[in-house]
Image (spheres, helix red, strand yellow):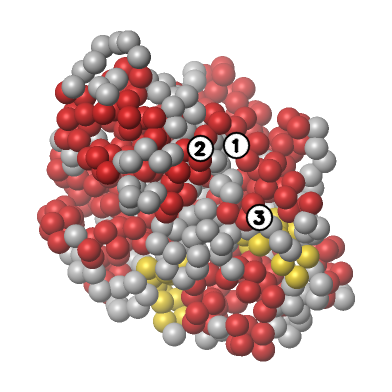
Amino acid sequence: MAGNYDPSFAKEVFDNVDSGEEIKMCMQCGICAGSCPLRHEMDYPPRQIFTLIRAGRRDEVMNSKAIKLCTSCYRCKVRCPRGIPVIDVMHGLAHYGIKKGIIPRKGTAAFGGEFWKMIYNIGRIDEKTLPLKYNLLEGLVPGIKSTIEMAPMGIQMFLHHRMKLLPERKIKGIKELRKMLDKAKEMGKGGAN
Amino acid sequence: MKYFLYGGCSLEAGGKNYMVSLEPVCKALGMEFEEIEDWNCCGASISYAGANELSIMTLNARNIAIAESTGGYDIVAPCSSCYIQLVKTNHELKEDAELRNKINVILKEGNLNFKGSLNVRHLMDVLYNDGGIDKIKSTAVRPLKGLKVAGYVGCQTVRPYGEYDSVERPKVHDLLLKAIGADPVPFPKKMQCCGSGIFLTELDRCLGLVKEILDDAIANGAQLISTVCPMCALNLEMYQDKVNAKFGTNFNMPVVYLTQLMAVAFGMDLKKEAALDYCVIPPEGIIKAAIGG
């Protein structure tokens, strides 16, 4: 495998990526790859991602479409014979990539970003406005188009009493929650940036 | 027995039929719930796109700390995403003193403190271990005789620690179904992920996952699917049209919460308590046939 070998990349991951140091335990057995429900959709399954990190292949790892394809089923974590929380490493890598502006799966990154923004703003998730906000990120016209496509489902939910009509209000302790989250961002691995 | 109930965001909206049915069912089994005051979202499966591990842990530590400051009961989470986030945070903070100190520095911003005095449990754990099969059987005055049900466990429901059931071959859901007179069918895909939080953004891929689950339920003769997670219920029920359009299939499989079936078996009102009219694919006909109504 020819390419730019960068020995500092593994250290970068250990020091800055949440749960990144856990990959030191990986023995390349491949159970994580075999257990993933979306393995056939991944350019590199987790096992290969971990090897690429050790080999210093920064570009392949950070641009991999696999690291944002996790459904969070935890099967890899419960099966790993070395006790590696594979899912946490994959989420950590995805988050690190987004922080660095490397976003191979824009939809999931945008949806997750809006999800988090809503938690930060009001403390809870409003199921009816979240998809709308996400759709409108594509721009007004495609946003309206996606919303119309989703409308039949929304109408069905409404007709079957499964839509909360009042807008979700801020939790009482939102100011304190935001202070906590600001602090957690700052104190997290690799700092706020 | 008294518990804190952490319903989460979905049980007030898309998963309302879960909340409506679980309350009278648990009351009938002698359980009493208290809501965690001013709770916040657990972060679910997708927050990592916007936040680091410590921030997501903070969300859950805040909820647990509020509960700890107001009472000494177990926290019950009916939603599997809420459950896994809460149980993971609780477990990791109890085990790791350094992490606990860090979180407590953060929680101090809101004058809260995580002590680690409570347990977090999934609703299914509480139904099975505290309610108990015998009590459920004796409360089921209107058993769902012969109703063939695919008991869909989902992935996060018993993970990551397998505290009350096997993480690979769970049986509690089926035992609860049997206790109310239903006939749980073999269902190898009972733990295959439904796509969870990336459903909307990876639609084509996740439709394939749902198709495999529905195929398996039907191949094993199920008349309906029982779930214990609002995300599973939503993905399995509401996307059947899209699965049909993509794969040329003809699915029209009702998806209900286990607690809805229990409410029916407990002799409760099919609408007011079992909330059957909340289901988009109507299960009433099949269920009425089973109870002879």
Q: Nearer the viewer, residue A5 or B98?
A: A5
Please state the horizontal and vertical placement of residue B150, each as a whole percent of the image: 70, 60
Q: Mark 2: which secondary structure?
A: helix
Please state the horizontal and vertical placement of residue B238, each as a whole percent of the image: 67, 44
Judging by the rendered image, the residue that carries numbered circle 2 is B198
In the picture provided, is B210 more to the left or to the right than B90?
Answer: right
- Crowding around mark 1 (Cα neighbors within 10 Å: few <14, some 14 to 19, many 20+) is many
Indicate whether B250 appears above or below B170. Answer: above
Indicate whether A144 appears above or below B98. Answer: above
Q: Earlier in the sequence, mark 2 or mark 3?
A: 3
Given this view, does label 3 or label 1 mark the residue nearer the observer? 3
What residue is at 62 percent from the left and 30 percent from the top?
Answer: B204
Q: Mark 3: which secondary structure?
A: helix
Kind of residue indicated by mark 3: Pro
Judging by the rendered image, the residue that carries numbered circle 1 is B206
Pointer 1 with pointer 2, Cβ within 8 A: yes
Disc 1/disc 2 C-alpha distance (Å)? 8 Å
Chain letter, disc 2 residue: B
Disc 2/disc 3 C-alpha distance (Å)? 23 Å
Residue B173 seen in the figure: yes
Indicate whether B242 appears above or below B260. Answer: above
What residue is at 68 percent from the left and 65 percent from the top?
Answer: B275
Question: For the N terminus of chain B, which image quadrant?
Answer: bottom left
Disc 3/disc 1 C-alpha distance (Å)? 18 Å
Chain letter, disc 1 residue: B
Quarter occupied by residue B149 = bottom right
Judging by the rendered image, the residue that carries numbered circle 3 is B188
